Image (spheres, rainbow, N blue to C red):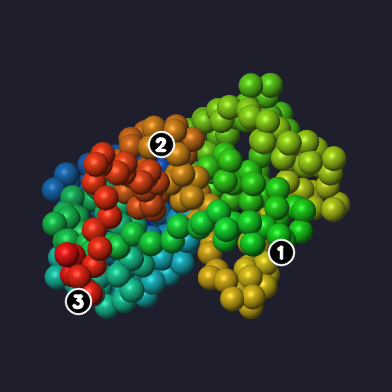
Amino acid sequence: MRTLPTRVYLKGRKYWHCSVSREWTAIGTVDDYAAMLARYRELEGEPRRVPLSVGALAQRYLVEVMPAKAPRTQAEQGRHMQVLVEVFGHMHLDEVLTTDVARFLASGPPILRNRQVALLSHMYTMARRWGSGVANPCTGVGLNKSRRRPRYVTDGEYEAVRLLADERVQVAMDLALMLGQRLGDVLALRWEQVLTDGVLIVQRKTGKAVLVGMTEELAAVLTRARAWGGETVVCNRRRQAYTLTGFESMGQGVQRKYQASGGKRFRFHDLRVKSGSDGTLEEAVARLGHASPTTTARVYRAGVVRAKAWRKLKGVGLVESDGEGGLG
C-alpha cells in the first residue's frame, strides 16, 4: 500500500483531502497517484511539502524502489531497513540531524553502518524526488574508514578446497574463477548464453553485459556440465537450478572440511577477487565488467603482485657475512 500524505485518505477508488477546517475535497483516483500529489500540493501550498516520518518513507521505498534491485540486494537492504526503522522510524524527516547520523555510524560495526547510512541517504534522495524539501542529514557525514578485506586465495588453497568438493561445486568454482562473476550470475547462467566465441554474462546487479572469450580450459568445464542436462549450466541432480542460499550451504560444508584439515576458510566471493587479482589489471576490468579500473583496483585487486627476481649485476659476487649479522 502506498504511503499517503498528511490529511489524505483513500475511500473506495478516490483520494480525499481533509483540510484543517474539515472540508473534504476529492483530489484524484487510485489510477494516478502522481496527479493526486500534484493536486495535494496545490491545496496545501507549495511551501508545505509532503511531511513523512522515516518509517513511512521506508515503507514507500520498499514498495516503489526496492523491487527494481537484485534479489540479493533486496534481502541485504531489507535487513538494513529494519535497523533504520528501529532507530529513526518514529522521527519526521526534518528531525533527523547530521549528529544523529554520526552517532549511528559510531554505534556498530563500521562497514555495516556505512552500508546502512548509504541506504538512508538514498531514501532521503528519493524523498526529495517525491516532493519533500527536507535536506539530507547524511550529507557531509564522513563514513567510517573501510579497510579492504585482505583475502587472496592462493592456487594451492583453491586446489585443496576443490579436491574436497563434489563435481557440481567444482564446476561452479571453476566458472567463478574463469568468468570472474558473482555466484548469483554463475548459478543463473543458461546454455543459450554459451556461444561459440565465449560466454555472455548479463550481470544481475548492474545489468552490464560481459562476453568472456572461450578457451580450451573453459570449454572443458562447460562440457563437463553439459552432461547434467539442465537448462542452467550448473544444476542439481534433478536438473533444476540451485537457489543461491542452497548452493552457499553446500559451499560452506566444503569449507568446514577444509578448515578441519587445517586450512583457512574463504568465501565464494573471494574467487572473484582472485579472478580480478591474477593477470593484468586491464584483463580484470574487462572480465569483471567494471566501468572504471579504479573500482577493480580498489576492491578486487588483492594486493598480490607477481614479479620476477631481479637480475644479478655482472661482476658482483656474493658478500660474505662478517659474523655479526652485518655485511662485510
Seen in the picture, residue 87 relative to 11 is either above or below; the reply is: below
Using the numbered discs, state the Cα–Cα distance from disc 1 to disc 3 in whole angstroms: 48 Å
Identified at 54% across, 62% down, the residue is 267
Instruction: Give 9 or 202, whichever is nearer the viewer.
Output: 202
Q: What residue does disc 3 label?
A: 324
| Residue 153 picture location, percent across and down | 50, 57
> Which mark identifies residue 205?
none
Question: Is residue 64 rendered to the left or right of residue 101?
Answer: right
Q: Secondary structure at mark 2?
A: loop
Question: Is residue 167 rendered to the left or right of residue 36?
Answer: right
Callout 1 environment at 10 Å: few (<14), some (14 to 19), or many (20+)? some
Q: Earlier in the sequence, mark 2 or mark 3?
A: 2
Seen in the picture, residue 166 relative to 279 is either above or below; the reply is: below
Q: What residue does disc 2 label?
A: 280
Q: Secondary structure at mark 3?
A: loop
- Circle 2: residue type: Thr
The image quadrant of residue 216 is: top right
Q: What residue does disc 1 label?
A: 164
| Residue 33 picture location, percent across and down | 41, 42
Quarter the C terminus occupies: bottom left
Q: Is mark 2 in CB contact (under 8 Å) with mark 1?
A: no
Using the numbered discs, state the Cα–Cα distance from disc 2 to disc 3 in whole angstroms: 43 Å
Q: Earlier in the sequence, mark 1 or mark 3?
A: 1
Q: Secondary structure at mark 1?
A: helix
Q: Is residue 276 visible?
A: yes
Using the numbered discs, state the Cα–Cα distance from disc 2 to disc 1 in whole angstroms: 30 Å
Q: Is mark 2 in CB contact (under 8 Å) with mark 3?
A: no
Identified at 45% across, 57% down, the residue is 152
